Image: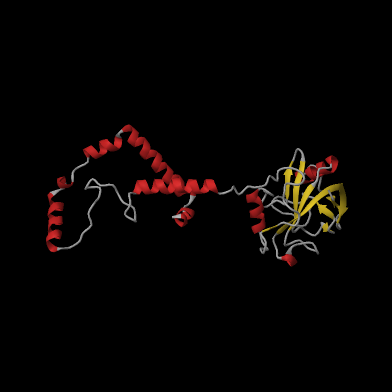
């Protein structure tokens, strides 16, 4: 029964629950008893049908018969009462889910340590996005696309170092993190910069708040991070590497066009 419960979709669960609730309302109003009272008895079917059943009986041929015409309740594939078995299954599923711990076990929407040991790997063995979905499900890092988890009013909770256009530099205890913006709508940070970045960009403004407030940023490294500190050589996944402080926030000219780019210097804390 447990395997059947686990295979049911959310839609099927809601449908079965509605069946049970509607049945209870109909019974309370007496509608089910009324329907049974006015239902045609089995011997009131048209004569042609009756004679067909009689011929089938005489020939010894087994034919289908309607449980509805006989005034009986419909049966499920296993022969049990449909409404009763479905209600029991729905109740059993809710009971099973109540005994399981919720997926969200951490509250990453805060600054500093959230109870995850440094070195923890999410999506171990995977070199794509499994770790992102795992972190989002358990609450450690909710965004599944953006590399920063931001609160525009207070600062950045965490960043993921995985891939960019090569402007960031990861030296282990010190990180030079390139900001956001300066690209046309629809382009991500792997595209070449087209115009100046500014502090008006939400990512840049939020990381700048960490610099002025001193609030730490949790740093996570992924399998596509260039250099010696990614996870490609250690089995993939996304690894939590501890707390960093934003010690610098500056706009610097870069490239042949000398376009201003936001750079943030992050230094590992030893708290």
Could you tell me residue 81's position as x and y percent? 32, 49
Counting the numbered discs, the total is: 0
Q: Going by the picture, which residue comes out furthest to the bottom?
A: 233
Q: Going by the picture, which residue comes out furthest to the front?
A: 99
Look at the picture and state if 181 lies above or below 26.
below
- Residue at point 63%, 47% (across, down): 104
Q: Nearest the camera: 113 or 191? A: 113
Could you tell me residue 194's position as x and y percent? 78, 53
Name the quadrant containing residue 258: bottom right
Q: Nearest the camera: 143 or 118? A: 118
- Residue at point 21%, 59% (across, down): 63
- Residue 59 in view in this figure: yes
Could you tell me residue 190's position as x and y percent? 74, 58
Compared across the picture, whether 230 is left or right of 95 comes to right
- Residue 195 in view in this figure: no
- Residue at point 34%, 49% (across, down): 82
Compared across the picture, whether 16 is left or right of 97 comes to left
Q: Quadrant of the N terminus?
A: bottom left
Compared across the picture, whether 151 is left or right of 56 comes to right
Color scheme of the displayed model: secondary structure
Could you tell me residue 129's position as x and y percent? 66, 58
Q: Going by the picture, which residue comes out furthest to the top?
A: 29
- Residue at point 75%, 48% (across, down): 158
């Amino acid at each position: 029964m447990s395997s059947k419960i686990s295979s049911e979709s959310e839609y099927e669960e809601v449908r079965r629950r509605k069946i049970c609730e509607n049945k209870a309302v109909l019974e309370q109003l007496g509608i089910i008893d009324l329907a049974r009272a006015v239902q045609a008895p089995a011997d009131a079917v048209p004569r042609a049908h009756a004679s067909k059943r009689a011929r089938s009986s005489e020939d010894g041929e087994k034919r289908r018969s309607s449980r509805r015409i006989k005034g009986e309740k419909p049966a499920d594939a296993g022969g049990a009462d449909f409404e009763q078995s479905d209600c029991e299954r729905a109740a059993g599923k809710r009971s099973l889910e109540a005994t399981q711990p919720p997926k969200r076990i951490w509250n990453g929407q805060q600054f500093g340590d959230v109870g995850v040991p440094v070195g923890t790997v999410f999506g171990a063995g995977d070199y794509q996005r499994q770790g992102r979905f795992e972190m989002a499900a358990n609450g450690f890092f909710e965004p599944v696309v953006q590399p920063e988890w931001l609160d525009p009013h207070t600062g950045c909770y965490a960043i993921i170092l995985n891939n960019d256009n090569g402007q960031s530099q990861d030296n282990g205890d010190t990180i030079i993190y390139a900001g956001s913006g300066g690209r046309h709508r629809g382009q991500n940070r792997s595209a070449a910069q087209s115009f100046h970045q500014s502090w008006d960009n939400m990512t840049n403004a939020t990381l700048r708040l960490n610099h002025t407030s001193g609030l730490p940023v949790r740093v996570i490294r992924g399998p596509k991070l260039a250099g010696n500190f990614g996870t490609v050589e250690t089995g993939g996944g996304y690894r939590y590497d501890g707390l960093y402080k934003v010690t610098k926030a500056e706009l610097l000219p870069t490239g042949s066009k000398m376009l201003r780019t936001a750079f943030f210097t992050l230094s590992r804390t030893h708290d």
